Image (cartoon, rainbow, N blue to C red):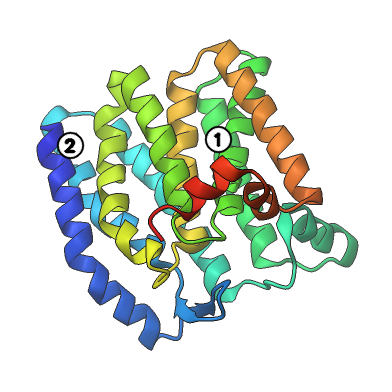
Amino acid sequence: MGIILTILSYSVSRFSLSSLKHFLIKAGAVRENYLGNQIPIGLGLILIFGTAPSFFLYSFFTGDESVYFIFLVLTITLLVGFIDDILGNHSVKGLKGHILMLFKKGELTSGALKAIIISTTSIFIAFYYWENVILFVLNFVILILTTNMFNLFDVRPGRVIKIYVLIYLILFISYPETRTYLSIIFASVLAYAPLDFKGKGMLGDTGSNFLGMSIGLAFVFNLSYLAKAIVCILLVILHIYTEKKSLTKLIERIKILRLIDNMGR
């Protein structure tokens, strides 16, 4: 069944992509990329359109109603990202910048709204899987920082897709029980990927949020205490670094990372 649902996700995504792209362009949802070209943003919406039939069929045939919960969380995360893509004040940079705007100037930016909603959703999930305070904190930090991590990487064509594929492969090999769930999403990403690598469309926070939360949930569901603690530490280090320095400049300085980053463009 997993293979059939994966193929279905890829097919629906591929079939819907052109129509979604033209819809966004006509609606004026375009943004200047790092090369100065105007391209459609928010194409991460394809992840909802592409995966929905497969998720619902999986639940229907297996009776696993937790899929509805996962899909709801991913949809909420995606939609607040889409709001930020369309209405966002992009002169404010970084999660820290949006939070400071809220508490210092009393101005609610779309970025702060996104952070509040994702944090609230993450708290709910962490409480749902409550065992003790330590696990609650680990799950909460993993969910919000993994989601935001994908936003940090989504500044060059194909970069966030490469990060997603790498983590997907590690989880696919290590945790067989997550294979169907992640493969349905992976298939949709694969259908969209050529557009991203060619620099003709952006996932935006719409897609980055969706992908980040999907990985965050997989971490919460599968990792041990120790693994979660290590992931949390790495995520905190990454976010502290990116508040002060450019991730892109770091990648460009390290030859192997630069080669991987440029692959496929």
- Identify the residue at horizontal 38%, vertical 56% (top origin): 264
Q: Is residue 103 left or right of residue 80?
A: right
153 shown above or below 14: above
Residue type indicated by callout 1: Phe
Name the front one of labels 1 and 2. 2
* Residue 70 percent location from the top left of the image: 37, 38
Q: Report which residue position mark 2 lands on.
A: 58
- Identify the residue at horizontal 50%, vertical 34% (top origin): 216
What is the number of callouts on the image?
A: 2
Element under disc 1: helix
Q: Is residue 218 left or right of residue 190?
A: right
Q: Quadrant of the N terminus?
A: top left
C-alpha gap between disc 1 and disc 2 = 24 Å
Residue type indicated by callout 2: Tyr
Q: Nearer the viewer, residue 252 or 117?
A: 252
Q: Nearer the viewer, residue 71 or 36?
A: 36
205 shown above or below 107: above
Where residue 235 is drawn, which disc sits there? none
| In the image, farthest residue toward the right | 104
